[in-house]
Structure formats: C-alpha cells, structure tokens
Amino acid sequence: MMAWHTEITTAIPKRWHWVLWLAYGLALLALLGQLAIYIDYAAALLRFPFDYDQGEGFELYDTVLHAQGQWPYRDSQTPENFFYTSIYPPFFHLMIVPLVWVFGPHLWTGRLVGFAMSLVAAAAVGWGIYRATGRRWVAVFAGLTFIASNYTFHIGPLFRQHMTMVAFEALAIVALAQVGDQAWTKRRAFWLGLGLLLIAGYTKQLALATVLAALTYLFIRGPRRAILVGLGLSAVAGGIFLAIDWATAGWWYTSIIEANINEFDVPQMWRFYQQWTTLHFFVAALAVVRLVYETYFTRLSLYALWFAFAVANGALSGKFGAGESYFVTATAATCIVAAIALVQAHAWLTQHRPRWAWAVGLAIPLLFLAQTRLNLHLPTTGPIYGPLAQALGVSANGPDYYDSQGYTQLGPHPTEADMQAGWQIVALACQTAGPVFSEEAAFMFQTQNLAKQGQCAEGKAVYTNPFPQLVMYRAQLFDPTQEIAMLQAKQFGLVIFRAQFYPQVVLDNIGANYQPLTEIKMNHFTYRLLVPKP
Amino acid sequence: MWPDTPLTKKQLGWLLCLAGVGLAVAVLAVDWMQAGNFAGFGPMQQRAIGGAGAIVVFGLTLVARGEQLA
C-alpha cells in the first residue's frame, strides 16, 4: 500500500509534482464542497416536519405499525384498516423502530437513517476500491463522487428505503469481492455477504438484481457451489417470504409483488437512461471500457458484473411511479469499476510506458473534477451560496437552487414559509371534526404530536396510501366501494390533496361530495383542502 | 464427482447462447399458447427476439475467447 503522497507522485518527475498536487487539491475541494452542500441539505430536511417527497409520511406510518407489533400489509379495502397497506418490505422500517419508540413518530428519524446509510454506501464504495487497488486517493474520490451524484443528493436524506437498500447492496458486494475462488464457506466475508444480500432484498425488492449479479459471479467461479448457494439463499428468503405471507393472510404477496407490477413506459425508461448517462458520463464511460476489458481479456470481477446488472436493472425506471432512484445502485457500481479502471491503467502505464504514466496520473484528479462539475447542484441564494453560485457561473433553474440535471422537485431547501404552510394545514386538520382524508401522512402525525401536548383536540389517524391504492385499483386488487361509501356519507371532515394520486372513481366521488376550502402552497406544490358540501 | 472449476470464456459463451435460444423459444411458445397458434410478431415479441439474438451473438464472441478463465 502506497503512502498518500507517493500515490500521487510516483513515476512523475519532481518538477511536475506541484501540478499534480494542485489538481488533486482542486478535485478534493470540489468533492468536499458537494459533501458539505449535501450535509446542509440533509440538515434542512431533518428540521422539516412534513412530507418533502410524497410517500415519506407513509413510510413513517409503516414504521409506527411495526413499532406497535403490527404488519402494514393488510386488506386496504376496509375502514378497519384505514384503507391502508404498504408495498415495501420491512427491514428499513424495522431499523427505525427503536428511534420511534424513544422519540415518537417524527420524519427526522427515517431521514437520519437514510442519510447515514448514504454515507455507509459511499464508505463501502471507497473501501471496496481500496481493498482492490491499495489506492487511498482514488478510493476517497470515488466514494465522494457517489455522494456528489445528483441522485444520491436528492434521495439520500429522505424517509425512503432506497438508499438503505443501496448501502446493503454495496456492503454485500464488497464483502463477497473479498472471498476469492476457494473455501467460500470458511470465509466470514462470504456469510456476511450472503446475509447482507438477504437484508438488501428485504429492504427493497429492486435488490434482486444485485443478488443475481452476486450469484452469477459465484457461478462463474464455481458452478456447483454457486447452485447450492443459490438454493440455500432462495430457501431462506423464500421461508421468510412465506412466513410473512402466512402471518398477513396473503396480503404481503398482494402488496409486495402484485401491487408493484405496473404499466411500463418505454420512452420514460430511455429518458432516465439518457439522463443518468449524461450526468455520470465520465465514470460511466470508464466503467463500460473496464467491463468490456474484463469480459474479453481478463477475468470478470464481481464489481464489473454488479455494474452490468445494476445498469440493466435501470430498465425498470420505465415503470409507472419509478424514478431516478432506480439508478443509484448503478451509480455506486459505476464509481467502483471506474476507479479500478483508472488505477489499473495507471499501474500498467507506469510499468510498461512510464513516459505516459504522468498523463494518467494527472487525468485521475481532473476526471473526478470534471465528473463533479457534471453533477453540480447547490442553492443559489444566501451569504455563502449566492457568491459561490456566481463564482461557479450558475444561476437558479429551480426555486433558489441550481441542479445540473435541470429542474428537480427534490434538492431545494424547505423555507420558513413552507414550514408555516405546513403548520397551517395541520391547524385546519386539528379543527376538523372526524377523520381526515389526506394524501400525505405527516400532517396527521403532527396532529397526534400536538394532541399529546394538548394543542390539538384529537390526533388524526392516517387514512389511505394513495399511490399503492391507485396501482392496486388499476390491477384490480383494490375495491374502493367502502372508501367511496365513507366519502359519499361525508364522514371525512377534511380532504387534503397534493398530486391527487387516487383512482379516478375516488376523485370523482370527492368532487361530488366535497367543496374547496382553501389552497396552501408548500414546497412549491399547491395543496388543495376540501370540506364536505352542505 | 463433477469438478467445480471456474468457467472458461468459451463455456460462459455457450451458456449465454443457450440462454438466448431459450428466451427466443419461450417467447414463441408464449405467443403460440396465447393465440392458439403462431399469430405473428408484435413489438414486444420483436424486442424480446431481438434481445435473445443479441445474447446469442454476445455468447458467440465469448466462445471465440476459448479456454481463458471467465
């Protein structure tokens, strides 16, 4: 393993060392700058007590149900279950249960875990590179490049399970990459990797691609053993699956599997591929070159296979309701493979073409600098961000926010006005007699928190989970009859809409029986509040 | 006992060819079962057959790499 300074200056004439130090310094400054912006964004979200991304409040509700010893996978067609079911596996929520037990139902609990797991994922990326190459600088750069990615930035500090899945995937792959060809079962890393794969799968279903990548790698290295491993892993995962399905009278399978089979939009898929490739061009190009090289000229590594499977899995971004998060795993894999490609190229040139080694040596930091520029995102106002944005030559393409991706819903900091708007909605919910039909759950949790302090007449229960309801209705898995009966009887004292992700028949019945009360703008979305018609 | 040695690129290539052919057969079989008889290729079937063909071609390029370990 090289010392930090030797890594940079090896095989470089002494008179050019200052150029390299300058390039490495600039790259590190840029990456640490994006890290600081990310931490600031996460802190802003931790302070914001309402849904920032639609669905966060329902993930909190899943956690609350687990904390109460209940499964969130249920018949969502009945008022007894508050027309609610969850379509996500439980591990992420179970991780947050202790925080909810201690601190109560607050969005910051899951956001803190999501943010922490994004750092874990970055650390796993860096550790994997360091173990594979012995190079510290490149490992640090690649880990920070993962953090600097627009997609990591947007979703890392949300109360959503995707980033936690990516962290477990990265840890699993890095663990299994240490195993080698022989004596798998005698290696702790092997069992750790398998365990992490299982956890990743029970964090979010998309981890199946990483599981398949790992099994494919093991099959290439030892087909008979890999088949046994695959059968064993399937038996354990399947056993857990069947146990939960039995415990939930079949609603686990309906919610986790059937409800996630949605309409597919091929142009949407290609748009996401194009966007991801554009934003991650330099590292993606390097990773592709390395994949081709390993495929035809040397042994396929687990990292390269993971990269291939993860990028292929991005095709699922064409599903209704899918988004950029479907490429975060691919970003992690890309950072690892690209870094390994750079180090291997540098090592080869140092040995065989030492006159050109300096070029790759200089290209390493410049490439990470260029990649960071492709991913640039930052607020554009304030005493620090304002001058910084000006110095970088960028202006807002969103609310007081620049993102190289273009306009994004996620990324701008919630403002004091957004906070006040949220409390205004909560106040209206508190004043309502009877249950509230809300498209976001965090408002209801705040009424519960205020009720405990005597500042709200009664805490409101969480009713409905709109997106699952919509996709299940389209798949003929959800019968809205009882929900509509309550709406027609005007049993809900208040309806809170944001994107109106409900079955059309539900929206029509709300329109027939409820009338507008007011509109409140929060996070640049217009929330429409309705009350029963006289 | 069947030795559990790593695959060569040639073996991996043949496996991929087999997978590609299997995918094409599965697409045809599903289309035949659904329609009662072969009813022509829609866009999804064309994409699937095209994908299967690409997998076979990719497999053949690996077969050409011979006994090098995959």
Image: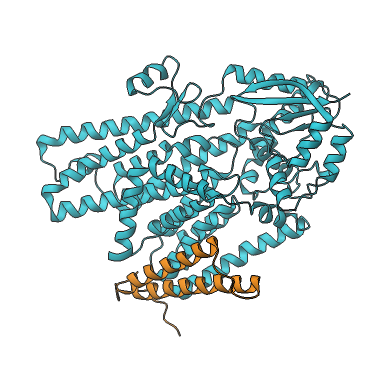
Chain colours: A cyan, B orange
User: Along the horizontal axis of the image, is A406 left or right of A45?
Assistant: left
Quadrant for residue A248, please give it: bottom right
Residue projecting furthest to the top: A383
Q: Is residue A377 above or below residue A519?
A: below
Q: Is residue A347 above or below residue A494?
A: below
Quadrant for residue A258, please give it: bottom right
> Residue A447, position in %: x, y?
75, 26
Q: How many marks?
A: 0
> Residue A170, position in %: x, y?
46, 50
Q: Do we see residue A530 in this rendering?
A: yes
Residue projecting furthest to the bottom: B1
Quadrant for residue A208, please give it: bottom right
Q: Nearer the viewer, residue A357 or A514?
A: A514
Q: Do we see residue A463 in this rendering?
A: no
Q: Is residue A409 above or below residue A127?
A: above
> Residue A490, position in %: x, y?
87, 31
Question: Which residue is painted at 73% across and 58% down in the image?
Answer: A245
Quadrant location of the C terminus of chain A? top right
